[in-house]
């Protein structure tokens, strides 16, 4: 677990309650819903994500966290609602344009292109590549300098993420944890402002957990905003400045980690009503609820 960091203060304009306005929000969500048949997966009235902070999005399995991620990044379309990123309305904007604007994400299941090398995967993450255009591709002297710069940037990031020794290996040869590192490093090729991580620790062996945690903290140190989905409460307690809790598609609690963990609505969401249990006790992990079995 990383050493204790000084967390951001004064992020919200009042005590932590669902939908509380933030002092300097980078992402604002209003009345966003997503239905699948008769099931409402997301029903968020209002949510603001504070700039230059690490926000954890937590909740039991089936709470709608990944669906909300998909909506905000343009991978899915809502039934109702709108949201803005850095003042720009993103409703209806496709995912590739969202990424170009500086809002990038990683996935719980890694998306590396297995039969390309690690370095080639990295280079795919760079934006505005002149050589990608058909006619320009036939004239390498028009984009050769940019290609050299992109390669140098990719190698610098691989070195930072301790993947430089793997740059010529196929991405398929990487371990699960190394693929998580590759996903995060490739996202930074886009020079993002907001980085959204969907369960960055899922399936990662303990040997690489510390490295991933340090890199998440480093994103904030470098001026980026981080929003991540996670179940490990020890991780949330140590690195999150703000915590948002979802249950049954709704935001049920918000606040600093030390406050949210004691919120009765959070305890009810995870363990059912009237349970006097510390969510971080013994294992440090939140019990997950299989919504199919609980209904």
Image: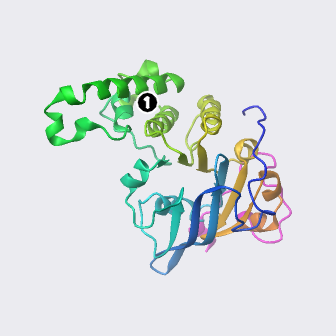
**Rendering quarter of residue 247:** bottom right
Residue 224 seen anywhere in this rendered image of the structure: yes
Q: Position of residue 231 (x, y in %)?
A: 65, 51
* Residue 265: image location, x then y, percent: 77, 68
Q: Residues within 10 Å of mark 1 (few under 14, many from 20)?
A: some
The residue that appears at 39% across and 62% down in the rendered structure is 93
Q: Is residue 37 above or below residue 13?
A: below
- Residue designated by label 1: 174
Start-end of magenta stretch:
270-295
Instruction: Report the magenta stretch's main SS.
Output: loop
Residue lying at 45% horizontally and 20% vertically, measured from the top left? 164
Quadrant location, the C terminus = bottom right
- Badge count: 1
Asked whether 30 or 202 is in front, the reply is: 30
Residue 202: x and y in percent read 57, 44
Mark 1: secondary structure: loop
Q: Which quadrant of the figure has residue 273?
A: bottom right
Q: Percent position (x, y) of residue 155?
A: 42, 23
Q: Is residue 168 above or below residue 112?
A: above
Which residue is located at x 50 percent, y 38 percent? 184
Whether the magenta-drawn stretch holds residue 284 is answered as yes
Q: How is the image coloured?
A: rainbow
Residue at image location 25% in from the left, 25% down from the top: 144
Q: Quick one: 15 or 260, which is closer to the camera?
A: 15
């Amino acid at each position: 677990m990383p050493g204790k960091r000084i967390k951001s203060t004064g992020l919200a304009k009042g005590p932590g309650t669902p939908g509380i306005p933030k002092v300097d929000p980078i992402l604002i969500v209003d009345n966003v819903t997503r239905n699948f048949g008769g099931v409402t997966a997301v029903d968020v009235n209002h949510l603001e994500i504070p700039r230059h902070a690490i926000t954890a999005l937590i909740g039991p399995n089936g709470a709608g966290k990944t669906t909300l991620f998909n909506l905000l990044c343009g991978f899915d379309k809502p039934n109702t609602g709108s949201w803005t990123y850095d003042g720009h309305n993103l409703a209806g904007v496709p995912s590739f344009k969202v990424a170009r604007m500086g809002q990038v994400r990683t996935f719980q299941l890694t998306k590396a292109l297995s039969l390309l090398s690690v370095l080639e995967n990295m280079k795919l993450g760079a934006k505005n590549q002149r050589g990608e255009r058909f006619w320009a591709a036939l004239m390498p002297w028009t984009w050769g300098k940019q290609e050299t710069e992109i390669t140098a940037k990719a190698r610098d990031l691989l070195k930072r993420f301790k993947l430089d020794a793997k740059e010529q290996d196929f991405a398929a040869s990487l371990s699960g944890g190394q693929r998580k590192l590759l996903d995060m490093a490739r996202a930074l090729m886009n020079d993002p402002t907001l980085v959204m991580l969907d369960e960055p620790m899922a399936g990662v062996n303990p040997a690489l957990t510390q490295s991933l945690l340090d890199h998440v903290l480093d994103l904030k140190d470098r001026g980026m905003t981080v929003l991540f989905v996670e179940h490990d409460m020890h991780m949330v307690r140590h690195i999150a400045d703000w915590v948002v809790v979802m249950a049954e598609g709704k935001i049920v609690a918000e606040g600093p980690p030390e406050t949210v963990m004691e919120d009765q609505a959070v305890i009810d969401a995870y363990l059912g009503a009237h349970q006097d249990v510390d969510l971080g006790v013994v294992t440090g992990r939140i019990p997950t609820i299989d919504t199919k079995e609980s209904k």
